[in-house]
Image (cartoon, rainbow, N blue to C red):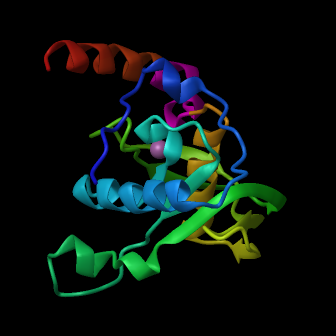
Amino acid sequence: MIREIVIYPDKRLKEISKPVENFDEELHTLLDDMYETMIAKNGVGLAAIQVGVPLRVLIINVPVETESEDPREQQPKENTLEVINPVILEAEGKTRYQEGCLSVPGYFEEVERHKAVRIEYQDRYGKKYIIDDDDFLAIALQHEMDHLDGKVFVEKLSLLKRKKFEKEWKKRLKNK
Ligand code: CO
């Protein structure tokens, strides 16, 4: 089921999400719905709070190269990285990348992140894993993990860019 996306500056995006304790059917439905919602909105990642659920859950699905224009072939469900209760164990270096967010649709801007991260997390059954990445996935993980702590990427902009963004965003919301 496609769920409604919480749009910036909705206060829910400021919530600190709580750890998942029950790896049950409700969690699996949430994860399945998050995939459907992300695909419907052409996103590559989504945190649970973006569909209004304050749990430490996120998904990432990096598109694969294909001739197909079907989003389900570009981002097959089985490629979805489901990340529950993630913790950064190590972070190294710095990089900048142009980010976007389904809660700030249509806005893209460069922000600074760690280049490489090592993250411990659980899957939908509660099994623990460690993931290492120093590429796009590392950026996406940091972006989505920020959501779990009530942070949106626009808050990482320089003061000047932030002011410009807030002004444009207010205008855009008013015109909707
Ligand atoms: Co986001």
Q: 53 and 45: which one is in front? A: 53
Residue 128: where, in percent of width, then height?
77, 72
Q: Can see residue 110? A: no
Residue at image location 58% in from the left, 36% down from the top: 54
Identify the image quadrant of residue 84.
bottom right
Q: Is residue 60 visible?
A: yes
From the viewer's perspective, tell me whether residue 13 is left or right of residue 90: left
Question: Which part of the image, by quadrant, shows the N terminus?
Answer: bottom left
* Image point (77%, 60%), residue name: 93
Picture residue at 45% right of the left edge, 39% below the top:
50
Q: x, y (%) of residue 14? A: 58, 25
For the record, the magenta segment spans 152-162
Magenta stretch prevailing secondary structure: helix
Relative image position of residue 174 (x, y in whole percent): 20, 12
**Residue 172 lies in the magenta stretch:** no
What residue is at 54 percent from the left and 31 percent from the top? 157
Quarter in which the C terminus is drawn: top left
Q: Residue furthest right?
A: 89
